[in-house]
Image (cartoon, helix red, strand yellow):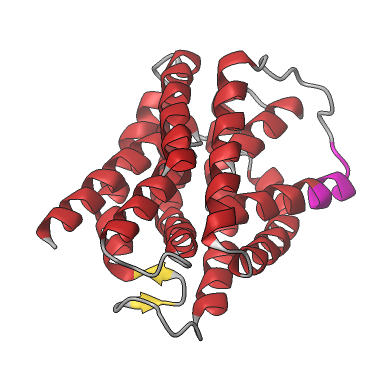
């Protein structure tokens, strides 16, 4: 148990640092690590991915607050875009979580791995988005938010892999896009984690100390250190070359995705 707690704490520190630094990545690391740990703990294999996804979103809910506060102090969050995206995001995230709860872990695992590979390929070879529509319509906000929220909830992430490029496409600098993406992660994680809690509430084979598809021991360990490390990541984001760091992160995602596909 002590060994598992140590892994949760380490995982939280990495996830918090990445959330603040890149605006992406917390869930992309948390989900595969938790899924592997849950299997080793003998948890029902039919729900290991559901628990990993729900717990990831619940941890992002806390991590995003710490990260956003740090970005807000630097006046980097574009709040009016956050508010306009939030309705669609919360609707999409709820629907994504409910849908995922009806899928088997054997299907969710390769879906997550393929998504992770796509993110890695984009980070390595995708071109930097150029500002195009600097004043998107309300319909654009709602539709885009719904898609971002839906996909993010199914794969248990804060949405930065999609929201950062979208925000840059609509006229934001890389630093403002990362900061605003961190704020967008809150409504995604809120609606998504509640949907996993609701969907898993009646499941009979949940491990002890679970609330629906949210595993509280893992959540607690991740949150403790992610809160500490997210502000450090946010501070470093304004000093370091984020693009170079993303390339290193992309290689890590490839390794994790290949491991999931072969596990």
> What span is in magenta?
136-143
**In front here: 34 or 86?**
34
Q: In this view, does 173 lie above or below 6?
A: above
List the single residue furthest toward the front.
262
**In front here: 81 or 55?**
55
Q: In which quarter of the image is the N terminus?
A: bottom left
Q: Position of residue 72 (x, y in %)?
A: 48, 41
Location of residue 220 (image quadrant): bottom left
Q: Residue at left 58%, top 71%?
A: 195
Q: What's the magenta bit mostly, secondary-structure-wise? A: helix
Q: Where is residue 62 in the image (x, y as percent from the top left)?
A: 40, 57
Q: Residue at left 26%, top 63%?
A: 41
Q: Residue at left 33%, top 62%?
A: 219
Q: Is residue 134 above or below residue 7?
A: above
Q: Residue at left 35%, top 42%?
A: 16
Q: In this view, does 114 lie above or below 85?
A: above
Q: In which quarter of the image is the C terminus?
A: top left
Q: Position of residue 236 (x, y in %)?
A: 36, 25
Q: Is residue 96 above or below residue 133?
A: below
- In the visual, does 96 lie left or right of 55? right
Residue 137 on the magenta segment: yes
**In front here: 52 or 238?**
52
Q: Position of residue 107 (x, y in %)?
A: 59, 55
Q: How many badges with numbers are in the image? A: 0
Asked whether residue 198 is in view, the answer is yes
**In front here: 86 or 78?**
86
List the single residue furthest toward the left.
2
Location of residue 165 (image quadrant): top right
């Amino acid at each position: 148990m002590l060994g598992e707690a140590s892994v949760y704490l380490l995982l939280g520190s990495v996830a918090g640092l990445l959330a603040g630094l890149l605006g992406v990545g917390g869930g992309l690391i948390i989900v595969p690590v938790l899924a592997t740990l849950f299997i080793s703990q003998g948890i029902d294999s039919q729900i290991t991915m559901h628990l990993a996804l729900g717990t990831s979103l619940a941890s992002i809910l806390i991590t995003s607050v710490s990260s956003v506060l740090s970005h807000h102090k630097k006046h980097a969050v574009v709040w009016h875009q956050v508010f306009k995206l939030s309705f669609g995001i919360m609707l999409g995230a709820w629907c994504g979580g409910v849908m995922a709860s009806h899928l088997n872990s054997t299907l969710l695992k390769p879906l997550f791995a393929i998504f992770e590979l796509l993110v890695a390929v984009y980070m390595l070879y995708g071109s930097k988005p150029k500002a195009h529509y600097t004043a998107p319509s309300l319909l654009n906000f709602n539709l885009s938010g719904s898609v971002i929220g839906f996909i993010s909830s199914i794969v248990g992430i804060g949405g930065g892999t999609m929201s950062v490029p979208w925000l840059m496409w609509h006229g934001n600098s890389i630093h403002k896009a990362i900061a605003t993406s961190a704020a967008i992660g809150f409504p995604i994680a809120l609606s998504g984690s509640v949907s996993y809690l609701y969907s898993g509430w009646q499941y009979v084979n949940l491990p002890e100390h679970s609330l629906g598809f949210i595993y509280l021991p893992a959540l607690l360990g991740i949150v403790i250190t992610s809160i500490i490390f997210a502000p450090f990541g946010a501070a470093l984001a304004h000093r370091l070359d984020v693009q170079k760091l993303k390339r290193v992160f992309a290689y890590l995602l490839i390794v994790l995705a290949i491991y999931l596909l072969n596990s």
